[in-house]
Amino acid sequence: MRHMIALAATAALAASAASAQTDSVTTELKNSAGQAMGSVTLTQGPKGVVMRVEAKGLTPGWHGLHFHEKADCSKSDFTSAGGHTHGGGERVHGLLNPEANETGDLPNLYAGADGAGAAEVYTTLTSLKALRDADGSAVVIHANADDHKTQPIGGAGARVACAVIK
């Protein structure tokens, strides 16, 4: 009997470890030429997603950072990733906008004089399950800072980096 309990406990631990592995995903961040320029790691928490971004080759300064609706970074301008994730219904952009409710909104990313940027951000606006839906999603870094108010993308400008989330 003890042997069976030990086997059941071992199986439960293995299943738990496998489940924990599916609660996190790491993906490569690429520039418009398709070259690797960093990584994005997303981890599901009890009430949201923690995202760690490490990038190089950016222009120094602040850059908009958003979740986009499709796991497609195939076009060099990254428009293949679609618009920001919305979560359904009529959505409004901007972390500082009182009407905002868009699930793709994230804080800006800062790149230093060497073009390297790193950030760890937390959002309660979405889940890893939602980001990994049937068509996936993408993390997109924009050329300029997001002002967190202006429609539709906060003045963040061109898309300069993209990472597929599946």
Image (cartoon, grey):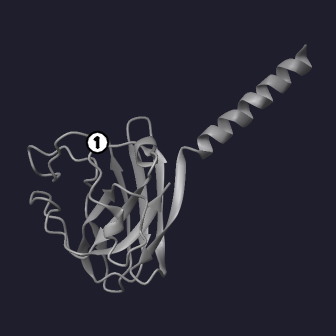
Residue 165 in the image, given as x and y percentages of width and height: 46, 57
Left-right relation of 92 to 107: left
Query: On the image, which quarter does residue 63 sit in?
Result: bottom left
Residue 125 in the image, given as x and y percentages of width and height: 29, 43
Residue farthest toward the top in the current orientation of the protein: 1
Identify the element where label 1 is drawn.
loop
Q: Which amino acid does label 1 sit on?
A: Gly
Q: Above or below — where is 149 with respect to 14?
A: below
Left-right relation of 65 to 3: left
Q: Above or below — where is 24 with respect to 17?
A: below
Residue 163 in the image, given as x and y percentages of width and height: 44, 66
- Residue at 91% in and 13% down: 1
- Residue at 13% in and 63% down: 147
Residue 10 in the image, given as x and y percentages of width and height: 79, 30
Query: On the image, which quarter does residue 152 sit in?
Result: bottom left
Left-right relation of 82 to 56: left
Residue sitting nearer the eye, 155 or 78: 78
Mark 1 sits on what residue? 87
Residue sitting nearer the eye, 126 or 17: 126
Q: Above or below — where is 74 with respect to 124?
A: below
Q: Above or below — where is 98 with respect to 80?
A: above
Residue sitting nearer the eye, 55 or 2: 55
Query: On the image, which quarter does residue 69 sit in?
Result: bottom left
Few, some or many residues within 10 Å of mark 1 (<14, 14–19, 20+): some
Residue sitting nearer the eye, 132 or 12: 132
- Residue at 31% in and 69% down: 79
